Amino acid sequence: MKSESDHYNELERREKELRQREVEIRLREMEADIYADNTPIYKTVKHQPENSRKLLRKKVILAAKLVAIGVAALVAVKIASIVAGIIIVTALTWISYKLFFDSKKKP
């Protein structure tokens, strides 16, 4: 007859084998899920907007606005430099007049 410890050891061995089989089965299931070919495959198509001319016209208008802003900035810089030049020449002329040509009155 078997002793209780033999019986207990036998139960533990069977439980261990059962757990090991369950783990193996679960691993096989997970592997099957990973490599499954039942994933839906969708055909991709390039998106073409319905109003491509409208979008092109918007882009052209935006580019024209950008060019206009650039030209306006260049014109503003040119005008500012001309005005600054006139102010500088006027100031130098006035200072030289005051220094050299203004009559020195002594009271």
Image (spheres, rainbow, N blue to C red):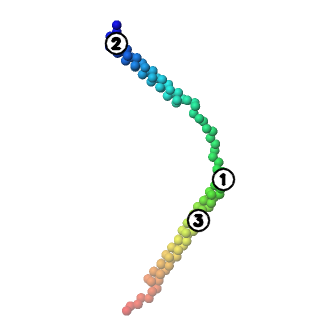
Residue tagged 1: 51
Quadrant occupied by the C terminus = bottom left
Quadrant occupied by the N terminus = top left
Which residue is found at the position 44% from the left and 88% from the top? 103
Q: CA distance from mark 1 to mark 2?
A: 83 Å
Q: Earlier in the sequence, mark 1 or mark 2?
A: 2
Residue 21 location (% of width, % of height): 45, 21
- Height in image: 54 above or below 35? below
Q: Earlier in the sequence, mark 3 or mark 1?
A: 1
Q: Amino acid at mark 3?
A: Val
Q: Amino acid at mark 2?
A: Asp
- Give the left or right position of residue 105, taking residue 68 as reference: left
Please state which of residues 58 and 31 is positioned toward the viewer in this rendering.
31
Q: Amino acid at mark 1?
A: Asn
- Height in image: 80 above or below 50? below
Q: Quadrant of residue 72 in the image?
A: bottom right
Residue tagged 2: 6
The single residue placed furthest to the right in the displayed view is 53
Q: CA distance from mark 3 to mark 1?
A: 31 Å
Which residue is found at the position 55% from the left and 69% from the top? 76
Residue tagged 3: 71
Residue 67 location (% of width, % of height): 60, 62
Q: CA distance from mark 2 to mark 3?
A: 98 Å
Q: Secondary structure at mark 3?
A: helix
Q: Secondary structure at mark 2?
A: helix
Mark 3 or 1: the one toward you:
1
Mark 1 or 2: the one toward you:
2
Which residue is found at the position 55% from the left and 71% from the top? 79
